[in-house]
Image: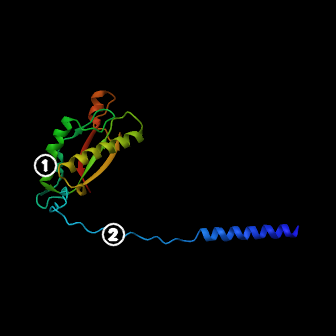
Amino acid sequence: MRPMNMLRALVLVALVAVAAAGCAKKTVQTPPAPPAETPTQTPTPPVTPTPTPTPTAPTTGLPLDQATLGKLQVVYFALDSDAIDEGGQSSLDANARALKSTTGDFVIEGHCDERGTAEYNQSLGERRAKAVQQYFADQGIALSRITVVSYGKDRPAVEGSDEQAWSKNRRAEFSLRK
């Protein structure tokens, strides 16, 4: 049995030696770089995109006050929607013109009607306020002036459990940032 163990040990040593020799690193030669071509035409300079101007707060204008905010039009929304319809766009265009002539910060309040869970309405109110915020940003009003808050169904404008009341409660309103 001893010669058999000795033979096994020699075979094992030989296999390890072959494996170690096969794993040796090979040097890779990089081919020389091709010669630089001489251009036959003058290259056109790369086109750099014009950056979109970031809206900034006006440096001149009247300070934003409660009287000015009271003149802003409320924006109303359809049931379960944060989409701004044509009437809402018209109201927001007028509001944006008024806000551009002022300085100061304000809050966009998102509201919902009484239907749905508190969590759902809180989320929907926030989406409505953010939709108005984005509309104002697209009109050039600085985002730094705007705070968004959702009151969900907690602050109805009109009490009632019918479509007439509900349609007045699905809205975005404006207040001064404190």
Residue 144 image-quadrant placement: bottom left
First reached walking from the N terminus: tag 1 or tag 2 = 2
Answer with left or right where residue 13 lies relative to residue 66.
right
At horizontal 11% and vertical 58% (from top left) the residue drawn is: 61
Would you identify the image quadrant in which residue 163 lies? Answer: top left
Figure disc tally: 2
Q: Looking at the picture, does residue 174 appear above or below residue 83?
A: below
Q: For this view, does 134 lie left or right of residue 117?
A: left
Q: Are marks 1 and 2 in contact (CB under 8 Å)?
A: no
Residue 54 place in picture, x, y as percent? 20, 57
Left of 105 or right of it: where is 155? right
At label 2, counting other C-alpha atoms closer than 10 Å, the crowd grade (few under 14, some 14-19, many 20 or more) is few
Residue assigned mark 2: 33
CA gap, disc 1 and disc 2: 64 Å
Of the pair 52 and 66, the residue shown nearer to us: 52
| Disc nearest the viewer among 1 and 2 | 2
**In front of the other: 81 or 98:** 81
Amino acid type of the residue tagged 1 in the rendering: Ala
- Which quarter shows the C terminus? bottom left
Q: Quadrant of the N terminus?
A: bottom right
Report the front residue among 69 and 50: 50
The amino acid type of the residue labelled 2 equals: Ala
Residue 50 lies left or right of residue 111; in this view the side is: left
Q: Residue at x 83, y 68 (%)?
A: 5
Q: Circle 2 sits in a helix, a strand or a loop, which is it?
A: loop
Q: Residue at x 27, y 39 (%)?
A: 171
Q: Where residue 33 sits in the image (x, y, percent)? A: 33, 69
Q: Position of residue 107 (x, y in %)?
A: 26, 51
Q: In what element is the residue under mark 1?
A: helix
> Mark 1 highlights which residue?
98
